[in-house]
Image (spheres, rainbow, N blue to C red):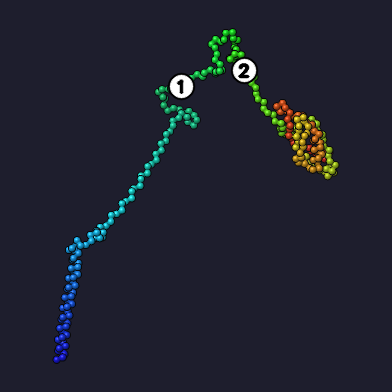
């Protein structure tokens, strides 16, 4: 008897639990359907601005302006017509219908600054000078040419100074130089005065044992005065004194 009561109660419980589940499932479906259909029926309650933001796409940005068209640079080259071709006259390609004649005006006679008298002056001399006596004196006066300044000192070559030499004293060969068999040329720089005498001597080159004898001899030399523009001037020149054992 106890087992029958348990079996009956167990069947009832199972049947009640299945019906409750089915009713709950149906109610949930209805509730979800109402929640989905409410926004579709009552559209005025929805935020329009937010919906427009989501539904309408923003306008695209405007396209960039086109670059300005480059204007091509036009160079106008004008060729000048000329009758010269490489410095020579070229042959014309066509004969012109009219040739312009260029007439040059005659040059006026040279003016002397004094107006003359037609027929001359009564009592005048034929072929007289323009401007009267004063004009004749001025025209006949010789032109004065300014005289160039004459330099006080000039430099000449050794050949020119040798041609002006009028007295030459030979040097005395030094005994020590002769014993040492020393020979050669002594070169001196000399200054000749306006009267032809030696004023200054400088040794340029030469053996020290021969130089004193050469200087003593050249100091006694005498030259003709050197004239420039009719005036005597000082002369700078070079003098060579030779010492040779054969000639000594």
Q: Residue at x 17, y 63 (%)?
A: 41
Of residues 4 and 135, the one nearer the viewer is 135
* Left or right side of 223 for 65: left
Left/right placement of residue 129 relative to residue 187 reads left
Tags 1 and 2 touching, CB below 8 Å: no
Of the 4 image quadrants, the one containing the C terminus is top right
Q: Which residue is mark 1?
A: 102
Q: Residue at x 46, y 21 (%)?
A: 102
**Compared to 54, does 91 lie above or below?**
above
* Residue holding disc 2: 138
Q: Nearer the viewer, residue 90 or 125?
A: 125
Element under label 2?
A: helix
Q: Position of residue 142 (x, y in %)?
A: 64, 19
Question: Residue at (50%, 30%) from the top-left corner?
Answer: 87
What's the CA distance linking mark 1 and mark 2? 42 Å
Nearer to us in this view, 183 or 123: 123
- Vertical side of 206 occupied by 103: above or below: above
Look at the image and tell me whether residue 71 can be seen: yes
Q: Residues within 10 Å of mark 2 (few under 14, many from 20)?
A: few
Residue 74: image location, x then y, percent: 39, 39
The residue lying furthest to the top in this view is 123
Disc 1 residue crowd, few under 14, some 14–19, many 20+, Cα 10 Å: few
Image mark for residue 192: none
- Displayed quadrant of residue 171: top right
Q: Quadrant of the N terminus?
A: bottom left
Instruction: Give the foreground label among 1 and 2.
Output: 2
Q: Secondary structure at mark 1?
A: loop
- Asked which quadrant contains residue 70, the reply is top left
Answer whether residue 239 is visible to the viewer in this image: no
Point 46% across, 20% down: residue: 103
Identify the image quadrant of residue 176: top right
Q: Is residue 84 left or right of residue 234?
A: left
């Amino acid at each position: 008897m106890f087992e029958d009561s348990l079996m009956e109660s167990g069947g009832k419980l199972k049947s009640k639990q299945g019906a409750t589940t089915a009713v709950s499932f149906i109610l949930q479906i209805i509730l979800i359907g109402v929640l989905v259909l409410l926004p579709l029926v009552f559209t005025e309650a929805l935020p329009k601005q937010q919906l427009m933001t989501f539904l309408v796409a923003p306008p695209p940005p405007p396209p960039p302006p086109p670059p300005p068209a480059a204007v091509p640079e036009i160079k106008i080259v004008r060729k000048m017509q000329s009758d010269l071709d490489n410095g020579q006259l070229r042959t014309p390609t066509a004969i012109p219908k009219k040739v312009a004649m260029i007439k040059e005006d005659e040059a006026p006679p040279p003016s002397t600054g004094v107006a003359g008298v037609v027929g001359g002056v009564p009592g005048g001399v034929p072929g007289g000078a323009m401007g009267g006596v004063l004009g004749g004196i001025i025209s006949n006066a010789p032109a004065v040419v300014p005289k160039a300044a004459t330099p006080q000192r000039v430099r000449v070559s050794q050949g020119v100074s040798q041609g002006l030499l009028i007295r030459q004293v030979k040097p005395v060969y030094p005994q020590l130089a002769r014993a040492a068999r020393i020979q050669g040329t002594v070169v001196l720089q000399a200054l000749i005065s306006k009267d032809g005498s030696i004023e200054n001597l400088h040794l340029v080159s030469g053996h020290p044992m021969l130089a004193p004898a050469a200087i003593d001899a050249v100091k006694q030399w005498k030259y003709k005065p050197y004239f420039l523009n009719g005036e005597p001037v000082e002369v700078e020149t070079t003098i060579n004194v030779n010492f040779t054992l054969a000639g000594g």
